[in-house]
């Protein structure tokens, strides 16, 4: 069983490497920047031209601009940054595998890693100039740092976890919401310590996260006069794009008010908003005005807003690839067989839902309940932060990416329980029988987005969850294992 899992992992890693090589070699957009990536490159070159702060505000995530600057300084082009990014992605996958092994043991841990490696929606962003890659790496680092605390709660491990959370927030501001969940998880994991010691560990996670954010906040204060580690407009542009009378749950031009270059077209946007076109903090002023207009829409059309939120949720949990700046189908056509194929999001969602259910049951029933409750706290934090990001702003595949990580991590116990119940050979037949349409998409390698019906994802998820939940013996047997029960 363990040998077979290692063979699957090796095959999936090979597929991933071939995809990245084919993308860099055959896609004409691989080594150039455009749209958001062009803004990141501009910010990176500003940093290099005026070390170490730069002179321009960060319209997008500043931490990724520094990563891009490091790559350009090393190689004199954005190619170097992409190499650094791919190395970070590889390290992140290895850390994810170690974290799953530490939590669930070698078999279930490898099963979790297989599910993540079989998720093409995650691989797609590993070679794109986007802060999504940084956020995904930081989420995997967070899971690994958490498992260090799970085994041996200490001040240093708590600080490492907090620093990982801070890095995740620099990749995507909404991921800062996982900080209290991680701090609570450390509190639960340190159940044998005194209350003052547990309180110190709790505070250490939050303090370390704040310390990681502090340098970028200082930089932005020096450059723009606003002490925030996040983009200069404070998320106001994205908020109004997601919440306006013309909103559809995805990116839109808000009735012609904004464009895809809204972050740099400050003067025209300020003019359309009736605001001063120049002056200190103009980005923040634009952001506040767009927040005001967005909240006005919510206040004036509450039922329309509720319908919009349901539309966002429906799209978020679908198989659709709502990619903001890249052409998924065009890339699939260019790369052909090298384009990654694997589990649709609905399959990952179903496996993760069953895994989270098993972990929750173990938390309530087993003698290791605090450890399992701590694992649930971190995973629910990731799910919560991702839901908030997509529902408050608008739904994109980039913002959905952390859900792959959370659900793939939880999928290991679900698959482990099914294999213990059925045996490996019977489990393969069982997996093929789950949903023929899902199996066909896995084997044929249908491109993300080529099956736009969101209900396919719900069907994938419900079929997977229903079949796995129909194995009561596996669920009961799993409850006898601890956080690393299948060692």
Image (cartoon, grey):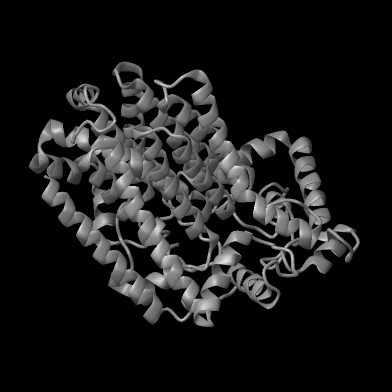
Q: Quadrant of the C terminus?
A: top left
Q: How many marks?
A: 0
Q: Residue at x 11, y 50 (%)?
A: 3
Percent of width and height locating residue 227: 75, 51
Query: Would you say 289 lies left or right of 6 here?
Result: right
Query: Would you say 252 lies left or right of 433 here?
Result: right
Percent of width and height locating residue 281: 83, 58
Q: Hey, which quadrant is residue 340 in on the image?
A: bottom left
Q: Is residue 302 among what the camera can see?
A: yes
**Nearest the eye: 440 or 157:** 157
Q: Is residue 232 among what the camera can see?
A: no
Q: Residue at x 77, y 63 (%)?
A: 223
Q: Residue at x 46, y 31 (%)?
A: 186
**Nearest the eye: 302 or 198:** 198
Percent of width and height locating residue 182: 49, 35
Q: Quadrant of the N terminus?
A: top left
Percent of width and height locating residue 401: 46, 51
Asked if 475 appears above or below 307 in the picture, the reply is above
Q: Hey, which quadrant is residue 414 in on the image?
A: top left
**Nearest the eye: 351 or 306:** 351
Query: Would you say 479 lies left or right of 393 here?
Result: left
Q: Residue at x 83, y 68 (%)?
A: 267
Q: Hey, which quadrant is residue 121 in on the image?
A: bottom left
């Amino acid at each position: 069983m363990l040998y077979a899992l290692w063979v699957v992992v090796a095959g999936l890693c090979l597929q991933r490497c071939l995809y990245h090589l084919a993308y860099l070699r055959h896609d004409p957009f691989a080594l150039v920047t455009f749209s958001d990536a062009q803004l990141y490159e501009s910010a990176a070159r500003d940093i290099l031209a005026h070390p170490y702060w730069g002179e321009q505000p960060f319209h997008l995530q500043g931490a990724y601009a520094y990563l891009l600057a490091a790559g350009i300084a090393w190689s004199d082009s954005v190619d170097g940054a992409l190499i650094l990014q791919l190395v970070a992605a590889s390290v992140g996958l290895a850390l994810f595998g170690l974290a799953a092994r530490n939590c669930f043991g070698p078999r279930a841990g490898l099963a979790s890693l297989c599910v993540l490696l079989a998720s093409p929606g995650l691989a797609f962003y590993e070679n794109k100039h986007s802060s999504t890659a940084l956020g995904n790496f930081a989420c995997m680092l967070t899971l690994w740092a958490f498992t260090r605390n799970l085994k041996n709660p200490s001040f240093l491990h708590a600080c490492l976890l907090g620093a990982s959370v801070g890095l995740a927030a620099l990749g995507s501001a909404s991921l800062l919401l996982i900080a209290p969940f991680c701090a609570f998880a450390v509190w639960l994991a340190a159940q044998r310590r005194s209350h003052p010691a547990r309180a110190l560990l709790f505070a250490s996670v939050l303090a370390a996260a704040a310390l990681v954010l502090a340098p970028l906040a200082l930089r932005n204060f020096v450059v723009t006069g606003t002490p925030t580690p996040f983009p200069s407009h404070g998320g106001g542009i994205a908020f109004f794009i997601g919440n306006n009378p013309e909103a559809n749950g995805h990116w839109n031009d808000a009735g012609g008010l904004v464009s895809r270059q809204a972050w740099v077209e400050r003067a025209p946007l300020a003019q359309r908003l009736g605001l001063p076109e120049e002056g200190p903090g103009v980005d923040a002023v634009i952001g506040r005005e767009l927040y005001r207009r967005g909240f006005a829409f919510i206040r004036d059309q509450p039922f329309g807003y509720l319908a919009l939120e349901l539309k966002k949720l429906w799209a978020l949990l679908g198989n659709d690839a709502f990619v903001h700046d890249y052409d998924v189908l065009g890339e699939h056509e260019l790369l052909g067989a090298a384009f990654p194929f694997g589990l649709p999001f609905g399959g990952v969602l179903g496996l993760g839902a069953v895994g989270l259910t098993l972990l929750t049951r173990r938390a309530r029933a087993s003698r290791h309940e605090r450890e399992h409750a701590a694992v649930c706290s971190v995973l629910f934090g990731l799910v919560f932060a991702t839901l908030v990001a997509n529902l408050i702003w608008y739904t994109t595949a980039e913002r959905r990416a952390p859900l792959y990580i959370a659900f793939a991590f939880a999928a290991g116990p679900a698959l482990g329980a099914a294999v213990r119940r059925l045996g490996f050979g019977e489990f393969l037949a069982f997996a093929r029988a789950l949903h023929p349409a899902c199996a066909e998409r896995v084997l044929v390698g249908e491109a993300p987005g080529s099956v736009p019906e969101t209900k396919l994802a719900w069907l994938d998820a419900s079929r997977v969850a229903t079949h796995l939940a129909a194995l009561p013996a596996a669920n009961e047997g799993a409850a006898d294992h601890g956080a690393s029960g299948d060692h």
